[in-house]
Amino acid sequence: MLSNWYIELQRVTLLVLATTLIGYLFGYPVVGLILGLIAYVVWTIRQMSRLESWLQHQELDKLPLSEGLWGRLFDSIYRQERDHQTAKRKLQTIINRIQQSTSALQDAVIMVESDGTLEWWNRSTEALLGFRTPVDGGQHITNLIRDPDFVEYFELGDYTTPLTLNSPINQSVALEMTITPFGNDERLITARDITHIEHLERMRKDFVANVSHELKTPLTVLIGYLETLIDYSDESDNRWLRIYHQMQSQAVRMQDLVHDLLILTRLETTEINVKEQPVNLKQLLEHLAAEARSFSNGRHEIQISAIDIEIDGCYDELSSAFSNLIFNAVKYTPEGGRVDITGYRDKTSIRVDVIDNGPGIDQKHIPHLTERFYRVDASRKSDTGGTGLGLAITKHILMRHNGHLLIESKLGYGSKFSCEFPLSVLSSGLPDPSN
């Protein structure tokens, strides 16, 4: 099959020969040749004009009629345009269904351009965040959601943890916002109404706090009477004395549990001014190490190394957080083991490490250690005297001081619990210890 350009070349050649022959018959062959070429150029320009007009008006059903190369060109463009329109309709149908489905969601869905301007949002966004269609189109997201926490969260770029804030149009509505980057630095923002969940969480905390508070008095009375019974019991009657001691042990454990629950509830429901008092890190760790040595009673080697700096925070809370880690290391490390306590700073943070050479913890348990009442296995059972709330309390205390807990452990190789704080907790006016 001959190619299109070759066929068109034949057509031009025949036209030129024909006009030249006609010119020759009249005695002007050159004039005939020129007129033939001019006729072909005019015809070509006409075809180009028809093509330009057709493409400009986009009237797919009014395909210009032509022959040869131009006819095939019109047909090819027509088929491509028809396929394009078909694909466009299918794509638009998919987009419409996606928009309809997202519009039906009760959660707010917002698409944001790379520069932070609004591209699209669903109907729930108008109800939860007060966006107006189409007035707010093209606005920057922080012009409509001006909460400082959201602005910081949006600009920081770390979206691993959802953000909880109140609706800008209804402060009684709590929203959980997540941001997912996609495409060319664009972002998809979702906002979910968690008012009911927040209400249930407050009810849970209030219930735990109230029950724990109500248990304090009867437990105190029970422990007091048990101490009296033990003091006045006949030592020859070992059966009853053993029962009294078991009752006292469990009552004291319940009292410790109530105490820890009250502490945890207070940590979850109150705020702290971390600049309330400067805490000398070295003195605090040395004091806790001395208490740990007394608790160990010579069964462990406990070493401490800490720099002499002061950090802003609550002394009692920091003491509770560090002591939980130190006493856990002593309790779960076999006799003859070693516990190292270090307090230091580097270029980016202040850290307190508690390292032991105990039995270690399987990796699968580490993400759950700060959950309430979570116990690893038989080696960390309740008869060690713990309530299962110590690490949860430590985690919340560190969060209230802008810090976090890091856990490293391997079975048979001991454990390392680290409290990491930003340098901003350093007390103001103190010299830089690194100088």
Image (tube, grey):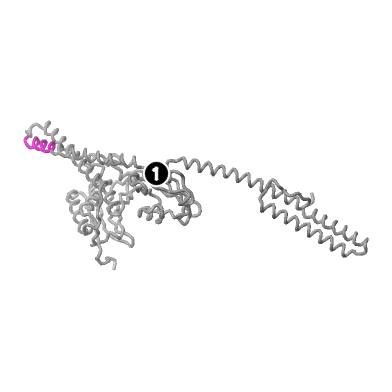
Judge whether residue 386 is colored magenta: no
**Numbered circles on residues, count:** 1
| Residue 386 place in picture, x, y as percent | 23, 42
Q: Looking at the rendering, in which quadrant would you find the C terminus?
A: bottom left
Magenta stretch: dominant SS?
Answer: helix
Q: Quadrant of residue 370?
A: top left
> As rendered, which of 336 and 1 lies closer to the eye?
1
User: Residue sitting at 47 percent across and 57 percent down?
Assistant: 115
- Residue 186 seen in the figure: no
Judging depth in this view, the residue of 435 and 356 nearest the camera is 435
Q: Amino acid at mark 1?
A: Arg
Foreground pick, 217 / 176: 176
Residue at (14% x, 33% y) in the render: 243
Residue 316 is at least partly visible in this image: yes
Residue 374 is situated, as x and y percent measured from the top left of the image, at 29, 41
Q: Which residues are magenta?
A: 221-232
Q: Secondary structure at mark 1?
A: strand
Left or right, residue 61 beside residue 407: right
417 vs 128, left or right, is left
Q: Nearer the viewer, residue 339 or 40?
A: 40
Q: Which residue is mark 1?
A: 192
Q: In the figure, is residue 118 to the left or right of 28?
A: left
Outermost residue, front side: 135
Q: Position of residue 422 (x, y in %)?
A: 31, 58
Vertically, is 60 above or below 222? Answer: below
Image coordinates of residue 76 in percent, x first then y, are 71, 49
